[in-house]
């Protein structure tokens, strides 16, 4: 099934996240520094803003149709807290273990897959066409206002 236009930008961000997650998951002593750096660049340029848009716009839109304690919502928020913590740890540690990098890669990969396979279909089924259109506009405005995007565009 084709992804709703309202969620297309988030899915594009997810693609970038999966590439970075794969590098983390395959980290070896020889590639650890490059994998760490790729994640930190992704996190600064896309990841943080992506999480913010999901928390500020996407999840509240779904919470109009599902209880805020819905398993999909709780899982996304829990994942966000964990990835943020791991990102901060990675930024503070110039020489993380390969196991730490792989664990972050596994977590990021599983998180993205959950959103694509569970959360996004739930949103597409719950929101009316007009709500999806309004969500699309809000997400686009948030995407364009990200400092790293406006300076590189």
Image: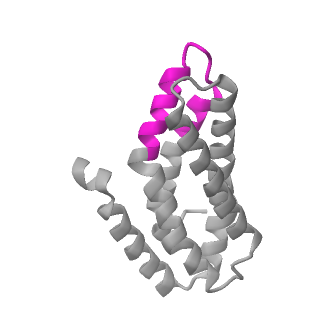
Question: Which residue is rendered at x = 51% and y = 35% of the image?
Answer: 92
* Segment tinted magenta in the rendering: 18-43
View extreme (top): residue = 30
View extreme (front): residue = 92
The location of residue 113, given as percent across then percent down, is 66, 51
Residue 57 vertical placement versus 35 (above, below) = below
Main SS, magenta residues? helix
Question: Which residue is rendered at x = 64% and y = 77% of the image?
Answer: 125
* Number of marks present in the image shown: 0
**Residue 23 among those drawn in magenta:** yes
Question: Which residue is rendered at x = 61% and y = 86% of the image?
Answer: 64
Q: Quadrant of the N terminus?
A: bottom right
The location of residue 67, given as percent across then percent down, is 71, 82
In this picture, residue 112 sits left or right of residue 133: right
The location of residue 28, given as percent across then percent down, is 62, 17
Residue 89 vertical placement versus 47 (above, below) = above
Question: Which residue is rendered at x = 74% and y = 76% of the image?
Answer: 69
Tell which of 81 and 50 is nearer to you: 81
**Residue 104 among those drawn in magenta:** no
The location of residue 122, given as percent across then percent down, is 67, 72
Can you see residue 153?
no
Colouring convention used in this rendered image of the protein? one colour
Tell which of 43 and 120 is nearer to you: 43
Can you see residue 6?
yes
In this picture, residue 135 sits left or right of residue 125: left
């Amino acid at each position: 099934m084709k992804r709703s236009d309202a969620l297309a930008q988030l899915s594009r961000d997810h693609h970038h996240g999966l590439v970075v997650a794969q590098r983390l998951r395959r980290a070896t002593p020889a590639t650890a520094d490059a994998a760490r750096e790729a994640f930190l660049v992704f996190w600064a340029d896309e990841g943080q803003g992506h999480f913010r848009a999901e928390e500020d716009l996407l999840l509240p839109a779904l919470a109009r149709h599902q209880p805020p304690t819905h398993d999909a919502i709780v899982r996304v928020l829990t994942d966000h807290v964990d990835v943020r913590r791991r990102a901060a740890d990675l930024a503070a540690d110039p020489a993380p273990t390969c196991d730490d990098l792989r664990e972050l890669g596994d977590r990021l990969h599983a998180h993205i897959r959950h959103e694509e396979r569970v959360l996004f279909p739930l949103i597409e089924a719950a929101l009316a066409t007009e709500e999806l259109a309004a969500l699309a506009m809000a997400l686009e405005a948030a995407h364009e206002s990200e400092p790293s995007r406006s300076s590189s565009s």
